[in-house]
Each structure stands twice: as C-alpha cells, then as structure tokens.
C-alpha cells in the first residue's frame, strides 16, 4: 500500500519521464531544445487555458475574454481535465511544461466553489504562485456595444488603493496580474499607442474589482490632449478564495537576474524610480574676478544719478562730522 505522498511522487516522476530530453537528431530539434532552455532575455510569457471537470457560464465567458486580451500569447486545451491544482498540481505542471507555458488559467465550477477560476505561474516546471478567485459578477466584452480596441495592444495597468501593498498575498497577486498582461518590452511608445487601461481595485471586504477602459484622446486647445475613458469590458468582481504563494527564498530565486544583464555602477550616474537617468557634473572653482566683462552703455549711470550720489555722500559726511563734534564736546577729559 502506498501513501498519498508516495502516489503523488510516483505520478509526478512518471509525467516527467514522458518528457525526457533526448539527444536531437536534426537541426530543427536542436533549435527547439535550445529555445526551451533558460534565456538571458526571456520572451513574453505564454498562458495556458484549460477547463476542469465542469466549466460553463461566467467561467467560460471570463476565460474567453482573457484569451482575447492575451492573444497571441495563448494556448487553449479544449478537453476537460480531471485536475485539482491545490491538491495535486503535478498534472498541471506536466501540461504547462509540454506546452511551454509559464502562466496558466484553470476554470471550473462546483457546488462548493461555483464560478471558480485559478490564476498561477510556473517556475522551473513547478507551481510558483496560485490564486483561486470566485466570480461574483461578470459582464463580458460582448455586452458592451461600443468600439473596441485593436488586437495585441499593450494595456496600462492601474492598481487603485493602498491595500495592494499591505499584505504579502495582495503584493504577489498584483505581481501576477502584471506578469499576466505584460507583453513585449519596447524602447519607446507614441501617445496614440496608449489605447487600453485595465484597472484593479481592492475593496474593504477584500474583493477585486476589474474594469477595462478605452482611452479617448480629445481636443483640448493645447498640445496635450484631453483624456476620457470609455468602459469596453470585461467588467468583473472577484472574491479571493484559496491562495498558494512561494516562500521568500524561492520567490527571490525566481526573480534573480543573470549577471550578464546586470549593469555595473557608473560614477556620478544614477537612475530614479521612473527609469530616468541622471548625471552629476563636478566643476572646478570658477575665477569670476578674471572674467572680462564689457561695459554696456545702458548700464552706465546718468548725470542725474551721479549728482544724486554726490549729494548723498556730502550729507553723510556732514552728519558724521557733526556727530564727531558733539561727542567731543560731551567728553569732560577733552582739552
């Protein structure tokens, strides 16, 4: 008889053996294996979408809209999967490794946990973080009858309120949302390219409010346009159910950057929180006395100003002389 731990260990290693790396025989096979190895600069992460034993209603609509926001970095498994990620994540880890996906979304519904969706990410073929969210209210993109944004648009993420930084679970969930909707890194962006905003708000009863807006650039009579927001969906209210976050050591290891990408410190050059590079310039002592200045006629004093200065000096001298005589007369020792 095997214990539950032994069965999980055996099933996990059986799944790993199915993907045992073989020596490539062709150039294409070698290229595929090299692409699966860790890279210095990782490409945008792919998300795997899969259904549980029962999945329908708001869960299907939510996953469909998430696929639309994430395209083309998605892989969808249409078959139902008998998986319980919080009890045994080995099958989920096998599917993500097989499909080369670092993120996953698992949708299911049951009597105990209706309208359930699980968001998570993978590190070294194992689950790093996992959050179970319950869909309390959902309004799909198709319910908003207005103009939509184009495909492959990089959204702006807004996290409202100070609660996102108060607990470790909310900090990890915020980081997971950033990983989920992050796309390819770009060096520059034009103002017209900012079209989409995703807003996340934490309420007092620990619900997550997700809203999606299209950015409208209106005329303002100035160079900077006036900005308006139009809700385009999806609109969802989530409740946090179960969570599984990595330990501090594992999380630190997952965020570790290669030494080749680390930029060495340069003297008198710093970078602020917004990524702006600032430099400090040291100058020697300036000899202002040796600077040759040109006498400008406009700066010369007029005859009236010169006469006024002479009279002011005469008055000052007379006052000083009178004061000296007065002090000499009051001195009893003076001869």
Image (spheres, rainbow, N blue to C red):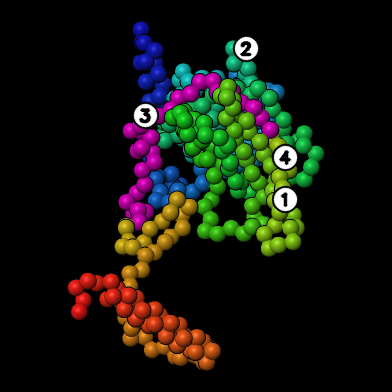
| Residue placed under numbered mark 2 in the picture | 111
Q: Nearer the viewer, residue 69 or 329?
A: 329
Instruction: Rate crowding at label 3 as few (under 14), some (14 to 19) or many (20 or more) other CA atoms within 10 Å.
Output: few
Establish if 69 lies above or below 266.
Answer: above
> Where residue 305 appears, x then y in whole percent?
51, 87
The stretch drawn in magenta includes residue 248? yes
| Callout 2 secondary element | loop
Q: Residue at x 40, y 45 (%)?
A: 37
In primary-sequence order, the first of circles 4 and 2 is 2
Is 287 positioned to the left or the right of 295 in the image?
left
In terms of image quadrants, where is residue 324?
Answer: bottom left
Q: Nearer the viewer, mark 1 or mark 2?
A: 1
- Label pair 1/2, CB-CB below 8 angstroms: no
Q: Residue at x 69, y 48 (%)?
A: 215
Give the extent of the magenta segment. Answer: 235-263
In primary-sequence order, the first of circles 1 and 2 is 2
Q: Residue at x 66, y 30 (%)?
A: 236
| Residue placed under numbered mark 3 in the picture | 247
> Where residue 240 appears, x then y in whole percent?
55, 23
In primary-sequence order, the first of circles 4 and 1 is 1
| Callout 4 secondary element | strand
| Residue placed under numbered mark 4 in the picture | 231
Q: CA distance from mark 4 to mark 2?
A: 32 Å
Q: CA distance from mark 1 to mark 2?
A: 42 Å
| Residue placed under numbered mark 1 in the picture | 216
- Label pair 3/4, CB-CB below 8 angstroms: no
- Label pair 1/3, CB-CB below 8 angstroms: no
In primary-sequence order, the first of circles 3 and 4 is 4
Q: Residue at x 62, y 59 (%)?
A: 190
| Callout 1 secondary element | strand
Establish if 318 lies above or below 41.
Answer: below
The stretch drawn in magenta includes residue 236? yes
């Amino acid at each position: 008889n095997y214990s539950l731990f032994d069965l999980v260990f055996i099933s996990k290693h059986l799944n790993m053996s199915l993907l045992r790396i073989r020596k490539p025989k062709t150039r294409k096979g070698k290229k595929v294996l090299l692409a699966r190895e860790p890279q210095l600069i990782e490409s945008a992460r792919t998300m795997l979408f899969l259904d549980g034993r029962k999945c329908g209603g708001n869960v299907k609509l939510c996953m469909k809209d998430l696929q639309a926001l994430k395209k083309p970095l998605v892989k969808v498994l249409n078959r139902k999967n008998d998986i319980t990620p919080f009890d045994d994540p080995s099958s989920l880890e096998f599917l993500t490794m097989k499909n080369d996906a670092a993120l996953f979304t698992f949708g299911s519904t049951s009597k105990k946990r209706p309208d359930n969706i699980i968001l998570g990410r993978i590190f070294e073929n194992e689950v790093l973080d996992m959050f179970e969210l319950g869909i309390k209210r959902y309004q799909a993109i198709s319910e908003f009858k207005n103009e939509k944004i184009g495909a492959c648009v990089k959204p702006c993420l807004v996290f409202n309120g100070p609660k996102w930084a108060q607990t470790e679970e909310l900090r990890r969930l915020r980081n997971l949302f950033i990983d989920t909707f992050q796309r390819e890194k770009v060096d520059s962006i034009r103002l017209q390219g900012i079209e989409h905003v995703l807003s996340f708000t934490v309420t007092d009863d620990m619900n997550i409010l997700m809203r999606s807006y299209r950015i409208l650039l209106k005329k303002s009579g100035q160079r900077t346009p006036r900005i308006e927001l139009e809700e385009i969906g999806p609109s969802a209210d989530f409740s946090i159910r179960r969570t599984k976050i990595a330990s501090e050591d594992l999380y630190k290891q997952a965020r570790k950057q290669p030494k080749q990408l680390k930029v060495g410190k340069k003297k008198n050059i710093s970078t602020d929180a917004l990524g702006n590079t600032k430099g400090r310039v040291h100058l020697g002592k300036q000899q202002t006395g040796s600077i040759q200045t040109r006498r400008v006629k406009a700066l010369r004093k007029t005859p009236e100003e010169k006469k006024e200065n002479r009279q002011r000096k005469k008055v000052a001298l007379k006052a000083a002389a009178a004061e000296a005589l007065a002090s000499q007369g009051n001195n009893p020792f003076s001869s």
